[in-house]
Image: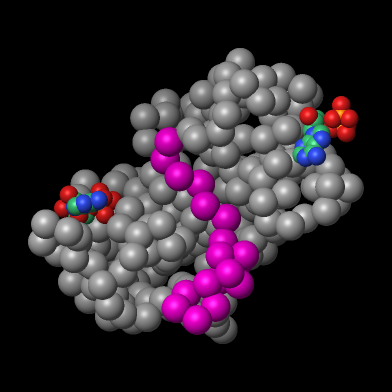
Amino acid sequence: TYALEIKDLKKVYKGGVKALRGIDLTVEDGDFYALLGPNGAGKSTTIGVVTSLVNKTSGKVKVFDYDIDTDLTRAKQQIGLVPQEFNFNPFETVQQIVVNQAGYYGVPRKEAMKRSEKYLKQSDLWEKRDVRARMLSGGMKRRLMIARALMHEPRLLILDEPTAGVDIELRREMWDFLRELNKSGTTIILTTHYLEEAEMLCRNIGIIRAGELIEDTSMKSLLSKL
Ligand code: ADP
Ligand code: ADP
């Protein structure tokens, strides 16, 4: 079983931009995978299709064997998405934000409260649980986005440019956190345009350029070629 299996994925946006020109990609269960590429390469489009925020033009996508064309609900249940932009309600408290998210996935309230303790502690946000999200620092907001994405206990966590615009201190802190999460069994895919970030974190890497996957290999073998 793969965490993610993409076959011949194509996306043409209205207006004719060919964002994806036939991507083939697999990510193993338990992997830490980087999708690396410059701006405009097609990283967000790929993630958008996998998380069903973007309609594909053609191709196949399976998430833990659930085909997004025939088993979308179950495919989505496997995925936690951390988008680039903060999109929580800044006036809600930290705990409300994560508990409500679990509610959207049908997690009973009692269980949601239990999980909120677990994931807020893990994200070092438990002491801030009653604080409105707008009062948090940038790093805390990032961690809140991740804690929220974990509340339905997805097997695959996808992060879109998780450290874009984040200073180096904070980036290191995020990296440690993500490493721990991966060690505990969550498959992680992140997009980035920093090779350094991919290098620090990831076991495998796909390099995307102008809608094509030009490399799909282990980090080790990529680095040995440079
Ligand atoms: P990346 O995430 O690697 O920066 P994107 O997937 O955002 O790349 O973009 C891939 C290509 O698709 C770019 O040429 C971009 O301008 C175009 N694109 C992205 N979103 C849209 C959209 N909603 N409508 C039209 N073109 C888009
Ligand atoms: P309260 O009874 O004051 O809501 P709880 O301990 O039951 O306190 O709730 C803890 C957190 O969950 C609070 O931040 C609260 O706002 C939020 N919450 C309360 N009810 C719900 C609900 N039905 N769905 C989602 N979140 C809730």
Q: Give the residue at x 34% y 65%.
A: 55
Which quadrant, please, contains the C terminus? Answer: bottom left
State the image coordinates of residue 50 (x, y, percent, origin top left): 42, 65
Q: Quadrant of residue 135?
A: top right
Question: Can residue 187 be seen from the camera position used here?
Answer: no
Question: Can residue 175 be seen from the camera position used here?
Answer: yes
Q: Quadrant of residue 130?
A: top right
State the image coordinates of residue 56 (x, y, percent, origin top left): 31, 69
Q: Magenta segment range?
A: 68-85
Side of 11 where 100 appears, left or right: right
Q: Give the residue at x 57% y 39%.
A: 145
Residue 144 among those drawn in magenta? no
- Which image quadrant shows ligand 2? top right
Q: Give the residue at x 67% y 20%.
A: 132
In the image shown, does 114 or 180 lie closer to the viewer? 114
State the image coordinates of residue 27 (x, y, percent, origin top left): 46, 73
